Image (cartoon, rainbow, N blue to C red):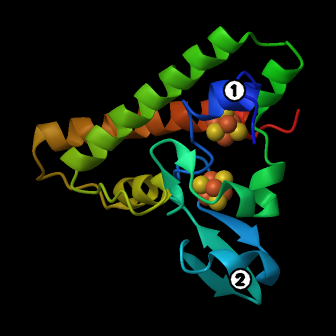
Amino acid sequence: MEHKTSPESILCRQCGLCCDGSLFADVVISKQELTPIENIIGYEERSGRIFMQQPCLAYRDGDCQLYNDRPGGCRQFECQLLKDVKIALTAPTEALKEIRQVKSLIQSIKTLLSQLEQLDESLPLSYQCESALSEAWDLSEADSQQESREQLYDQVAELESTLQDRFRSDG
Ligand code: SF4
Ligand code: SF4
């Protein structure tokens, strides 16, 4: 069990980006890891490997519902922000501010996806954005739709940059 004042406890309960489909589309798991959780999560097998799909069905109300049985990939993952807090490079309050900012950006992206009728919360965020942005440009669509698409393009670029720098980086 996480200590109530551990960096994980402080940050991850406010975040969840590595569980809710914002950061990843799936997590590779082993057959042994799948057995106790296969009725809880969504998964698919491709090329002999098992992928636990995200948004993870075990992620509810800010918590992992199978914390003690969570796969090794989940146990081992630490985003750059969490690493930086652990080595006191970033203060917890500053990290929480970054989390709030990125979640606000994600919410804005979801609003745009909804306006473009491309919001599907059962899919990873990247799939929804790719689908919306890969649609052929329709010159007959309303100006508001074109503006939404342009805003989505800019905000997805900003989100990708932030996720890469602060959440995915191995540095
Ligand atoms: S992305 Fe980082 S801070 Fe957010 S839940 Fe995952 S490990 Fe925790
Ligand atoms: S199993 Fe738990 S830690 Fe892993 S992605 Fe799902 S909710 Fe997150």
Residue 55 x/y as whole percent: 50, 58
Q: Mark 1–mark 2 contact, CB under 8 Å?
A: no
Relative to 71, say whether 44 is above or below: below
State how far apart marks 1 and 2 are (Cα).
30 Å
- Most extreme residue toward the bottom is 48
Pick the front one: 122 or 30: 30
Dot 1 amino acid type: Lys
* Residue hosting label 1: 4
The residue drawn where x is 55% and y is 71% is: 41
State left or right for residue 109 relative to residue 114: right
Quarter of the image with the N terminus in it:
top right
Identify the element where label 1 is drawn: loop
Q: Is residue 81 visible?
A: no
Question: Of the numbered discs in the image, which one, if any, rests on residue 102?
Answer: none
Dot 2 amino acid type: Thr
Q: Is residue 36 visible?
A: yes
State left or right for residue 55 relative to residue 104: right
So how many labels did they put on this image? 2
Pick the front one: 137 or 18: 18
Indicate which quadrant contains ligand 1. Answer: top right
The residue drawn where x is 47% and y is 30% is: 103
* Residue hosting label 2: 35
Answer with the quarter of the image where residue 52 lies: bottom right
Residue 141 x/y as whole percent: 12, 51
